[in-house]
Image: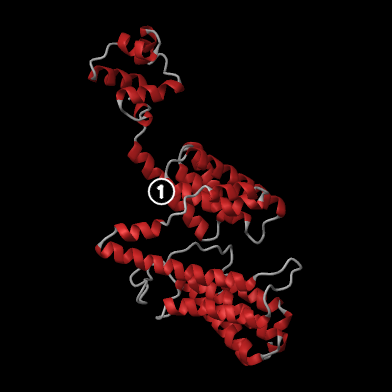
């Protein structure tokens, strides 16, 4: 049905004459007649007024099937996220750019595009010029979301991403201003109070899982920090203590060793411990932590998020949650590169245990 026919139908349903509609809009009755005969169409600025008058949406006036539109959007988003999570972030970005030409007001798609651009910017093969271009485009998308989106969840995700994107292009003060404007309240704590029964139990478990994982990841980050001159922030013994503390957080949460997505963080911590001991030529401790690193790397590269569920007490029954930031190669391949390029491991090249660990990584290297 054309927009003119829709206006005529809605006008008749309300026993309204063309003259009455024209008077409401401040135009002539002949203009309304031209619309209804499909000789002309309302100006775009008149659509919200007509929608408000007839108590319908502008999509309805334009003949857009909202249900079909949303289904199409969700299908595109699903395909784009599959591309992103399987390493083809460039195609994911292009898919979302093209989709936004068709659906320019989809804030959810804008949010997805900003995430894809951010991930493209931090790919290992990204040049400085590309990095700045992707970050600038992502920031512009975030600006548009924050200026017009009323969905608090999408807004929250945009603000979180802005804290990483804005400083990368010199907009540190803008990021700080966004965070400063957020009320100091905890959504999780409020929901824990409002929910009851099984829903409350599941939510509290989610809070615990998120809190422990965050504490562990931030402890790993803390242990990895450097001073302005590039030297480690902490001495080696303190680093060792911090990395081991982060590992203990994960092991406490996942007593059944169902680490899944968090195995990547565990592998990162164990690799740092192995590096410290390798620099000391301490073969026993180097191999001990390197073996743990390989174990967690393989867990991360081989778990199936569509089939796996947690069996540890607190996260029991939940499916793994997280974004895989790996690019065209997986973590096993990246670990092999690092071990082959790090001179600190040269003293172990002929060690049988070391060679066995290398072979284990080769088995899950997706570039072999």
Task: Tell me what residue is drawn at x 71 percent, y 87 percent.
Answer: 280
**Between 336 and 32, the one nearer to me in the picture:** 32
Q: Dot 1: what SS? A: helix
Question: Where, by quadrant of the figure, is residue 349 drawn?
Answer: bottom right
The image shows residue 146, relative to residue 256, as above or below, that is above
Image quarter of the C terminus = bottom right
Percent across and percent down for residue 293 are 56, 80
Question: Where, by quadrant of the figure, is residue 46 drawn?
Answer: top left
**Between 136 and 187, the one nearer to me in the picture:** 187
- Say if residue 157 shows up in the picture: yes
Image quarter of the N terminus = top left
**Between 29 and 41, the one nearer to me in the picture:** 29
The residue carrying pointer 1 sits among few (fewer than 14), some (14 to 19) or many (20 or more) residues within 10 Å by Cα, namely few
Q: Which residue is mark 1?
A: 75
Percent across and percent down for residue 282 are 67, 90
Q: Is residue 106 left or right of residue 326?
A: left
């Amino acid at each position: 049905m054309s927009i003119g026919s829709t206006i005529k139908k809605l006008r008749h349903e309300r026993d309204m004459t063309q003259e009455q509609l024209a008077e409401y809009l401040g135009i002539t009755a002949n203009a309304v007649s031209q619309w209804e005969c499909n000789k002309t169409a309302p100006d775009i600025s008149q659509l919200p007024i007509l929608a408000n008058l007839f108590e319908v949406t502008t999509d309805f006036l334009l003949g857009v099937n909202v249900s079909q539109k949303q289904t199409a959007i969700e299908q595109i988003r699903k395909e784009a996220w599959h591309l992103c999570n399987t390493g083809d972030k460039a195609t994911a970005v292009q898919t979302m750019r093209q989709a936004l030409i068709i659906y320019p007001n989809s804030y959810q798609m804008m949010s997805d595009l900003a995430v894809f651009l951010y991930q493209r910017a931090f790919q290992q093969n990204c040049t400085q010029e590309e990095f700045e271009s992707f970050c600038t485009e992502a920031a512009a998308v975030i600006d548009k979301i924050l200026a017009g989106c009323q969905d608090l969840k999408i807004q929250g995700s945009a603000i979180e991403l802005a804290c990483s994107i804005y400083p990368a292009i010199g907009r540190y003060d803008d990021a700080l201003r966004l965070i400063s404007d957020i009320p100091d309240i905890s959504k999780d704590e409020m929901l824990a109070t409002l929910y009851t029964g099984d829903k409350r139990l599941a939510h509290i478990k989610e809070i615990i899982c998120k809190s422990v994982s965050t504490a562990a990841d931030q402890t790993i980050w803390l242990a990895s920090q450097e001073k302005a001159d590039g030297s480690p922030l902490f001495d080696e013994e303190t680093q060792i203590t911090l990395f081991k503390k982060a590992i203990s957080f994960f092991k406490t949460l996942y007593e059944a060793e169902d680490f899944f997505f968090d195995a990547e963080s565990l592998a990162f911590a164990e690799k740092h411990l192995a590096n410290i001991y390798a620099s000391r030529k301490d073969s026993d401790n180097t191999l001990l932590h390197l073996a743990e690193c390989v174990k967690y790397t393989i867990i991360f590269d081989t778990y199936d998020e569509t089939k796996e569920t947690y069996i540890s007490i607190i996260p029991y029954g939940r499916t793994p949650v997280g974004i895989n930031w790996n690019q065209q190669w997986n973590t096993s391949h990246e670990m092999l590169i690092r071990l082959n390029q790090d001179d600190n491991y040269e003293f172990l090249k002929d060690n049988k245990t070391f060679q066995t660990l290398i072979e284990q990584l080769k088995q899950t290297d997706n570039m072999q």
